[in-house]
Image (cartoon, rainbow, N blue to C red):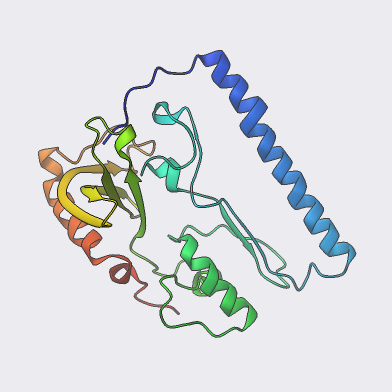
């Protein structure tokens, strides 16, 4: 489901875009976060304040897959974002590799602040993996992206349903009726093995040796987020 071919940006121009645009914006945001934390400390609020820093609803390509900008595909680089949470009275940080989604932020904040959670939330509080980073957690996380007709090779609209596990990124594409919001016939499939291809440069879904893996991941994708909930929360 690649977009129409666009000539690559010249290397020198790409370098200036990264330095003058992206890296500059990162430095600016870093400075803003520093000022926020400094202000909280000056007012005696830092210790008992929960801080969440995350990156919108998508990542940002800098020439990857010959693309620039935010979420325009289901590639991992578009859907993967930073997530940093500081609890109240936290004294040290830790890196946690458990699979998580942005829908997990709200129930996590509820638990951190003692607010009751509604039973219809799709997200899962991350408190258990804060306490035990090695806890068996979600099997997969999910994203969804609509390929508009104007950027498709054949002028048709498609919806891509994406699932990320520890090892694989699996995507199924279907024809899409945006007026009726209805999924149509199956169109295509993508599979990337992050253990050997973390940049997702080779789609191996059609390789015969991946047939069993594709079937297993397709069944797992069909179960959705409910099928990927943690088996244990303690």
Position of 90 with respect to 209 (left or right) is right
Position of 87 with respect to 217 (left or right) is right
Of all residues, the one furthest to the front in this rendering is 179
115 or 156, which lies in front?
156
In the picture, which quadrant includes the N terminus? Answer: top left
Percent coordinates x, y for residue 171 in the rendering: 27, 48
Placement of 233 over or under 208, stated as above or below: below
Placement of 199 over or under 119, stated as above or below: above
34 or 172, which lies in front?
172
Placement of 174 over or under 97, stated as above or below: above
Q: Please tell me which residue is depicted at 29% across the width and 32% down the height of the picture.
A: 2
Q: Please tell me which residue is depicted at 71% across the width and 38% down the height of the picture.
A: 27
Percent coordinates x, y for residue 138 in the rendering: 37, 66
Q: In which quadrant of the rendered view does residue 38 lie?
A: bottom right
Q: Please tell me which residue is depicted at 88% across the width and 67% down the height of the picture.
A: 43
Q: Is residue 4 visible?
A: yes
Of all residues, the one furthest to the right in this rendering is 42
Percent coordinates x, y for residue 63 in the rendering: 47, 27
């Amino acid at each position: 489901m690649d977009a129409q071919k666009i000539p690559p940006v010249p290397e020198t121009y790409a370098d200036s875009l990264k330095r003058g645009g992206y890296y500059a914006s990162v430095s600016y945001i870093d400075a803003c976060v520093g000022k926020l934390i400094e202000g909280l400390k000056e007012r005696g609020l830092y210790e008992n304040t929960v801080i969440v820093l995350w990156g919108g609803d998508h990542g940002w390509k800098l020439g990857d897959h010959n693309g620039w900008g935010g979420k325009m595909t289901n590639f991992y680089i578009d859907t993967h974002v930073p997530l940093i949470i500081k609890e109240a009275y936290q004294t040290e940080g830790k890196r946690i590799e458990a699979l998580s989604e942005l829908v997990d932020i709200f129930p996590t904040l509820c638990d951190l602040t003692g607010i009751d959670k509604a039973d219809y939330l799709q997200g899962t509080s991350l408190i258990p993996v804060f306490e035990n980073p090695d806890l068996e957690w979600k099997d997969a996380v999910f994203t969804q992206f609509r390929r508009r007709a104007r950027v498709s090779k054949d002028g048709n609209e498609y919806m891509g349903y994406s699932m990320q596990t520890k090892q694989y990124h699996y995507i199924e594409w279907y024809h899409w009726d945006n007026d009726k919001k209805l999924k149509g016939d199956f169109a295509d499939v993508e599979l990337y093995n992050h253990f050997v291809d973390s940049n997702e440069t080779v789609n191996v879904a059609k390789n015969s040796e991946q047939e069993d893996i594709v079937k297993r991941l397709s069944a797992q994708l069909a179960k959705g987020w409910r099928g990927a909930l943690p088996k244990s929360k303690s």
